[in-house]
Image: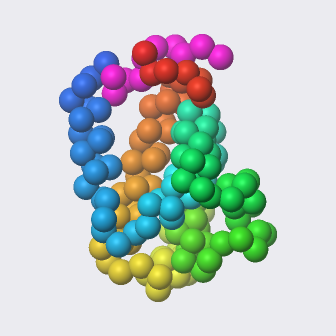
């Protein structure tokens, strides 16, 4: 697959700076980087973003995550490898990504489970992380940015 064009965030440098600023704004807010990375991988799988799925897999692997958990993200409900907090984050990531799949996009059950594991600051960071993951997925998928290719 060949990209249709450069990633729009590279063509519009102010956009890239803004997206990176949003990503930086949620660091150290009580949400572990590992949970953000697991959610990033799952959101990217749902959206079919090859670039982000590839980058997410590689980052988790580089950071020492087990292959069982990396592969298991795609079927996290059936896998025994995830904590209750990770499951809550993954469920929120799926719901916030698949907004149109059900009448109540993020059900009270999903919300309450996430709120049980994360304080308001960490939950805010998780919501913003999910949103920014969806932005990157949409940018990359629209221009058909291939996995493993540079953004040039």
Which quadrant of the figure contains the N terminus? top right
Figure coloring: rainbow
Q: Main secondary structure of the magenta part?
A: loop
Q: As displayed, is residue 20 above or below residue 116?
A: above
User: Residue 113 or 117: which is nearer the viewer?
Assistant: 117
| Residue 105 seen | no
Where does the image place residue 2, in percent across and percent down from the top left? Answer: 60, 13
**Most distant residue in the right direction:** 78
Please check the rendered image and state whether residue 152 is part of the magenta-colored stretch, yes or no: no
Where does the image place residue 9, in percent across and percent down from the top left? Answer: 34, 27
Q: As displayed, is residue 137 above or below residue 125?
A: above
Where does the image place residue 139, in percent across and percent down from the top left? Answer: 45, 31
Q: With 26 as the anchor, is 31 left or right in this view?
A: right
Which quadrant of the figure contains the C terminus? top left
**Most distant residue in the left direction:** 14
Q: As displayed, is residue 13 above or below residue 136?
A: above
Where does the image place residue 21, in percent across and percent down from the top left? Answer: 24, 45
The residue depicted at 44 percent of the width and 61 percent of the height is 33
Q: Which corner quadrant of the image does residue 77 belong to?
A: bottom right
Please report the bounds of the magenta region as a residue range: 1-10
The residue depicted at 30 percent of the width and 65 percent of the height is 28
The residue depicted at 60 percent of the width and 28 percent of the height is 147
Q: As displayed, is residue 149 above or below residue 112?
A: above
């Amino acid at each position: 697959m060949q990209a249709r064009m450069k990633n729009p965030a590279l063509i519009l440098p102010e956009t890239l700076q803004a997206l990176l600023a949003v990503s930086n704004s949620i660091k150290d807010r009580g949400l572990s980087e590992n949970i953000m990375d697991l959610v990033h991988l799952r959101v990217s799988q749902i959206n079919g973003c090859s670039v982000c799925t590839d980058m997410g897999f590689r980052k988790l692997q580089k950071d020492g995550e087990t292959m069982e958990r990396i592969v298991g993200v795609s079927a996290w409900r059936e896998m025994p490898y995830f904590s209750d907090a990770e499951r809550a984050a993954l469920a929120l990531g799926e719901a916030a990504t698949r907004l149109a799949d059900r009448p109540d996009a993020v059900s009270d059950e999903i919300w309450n489970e996430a709120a049980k594991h994360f304080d308001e600051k960490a939950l805010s960071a998780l919501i913003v992380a999910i949103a920014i993951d969806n932005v990157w997925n949409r940018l990359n998928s629209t221009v058909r940015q291939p996995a493993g290719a540079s953004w040039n």
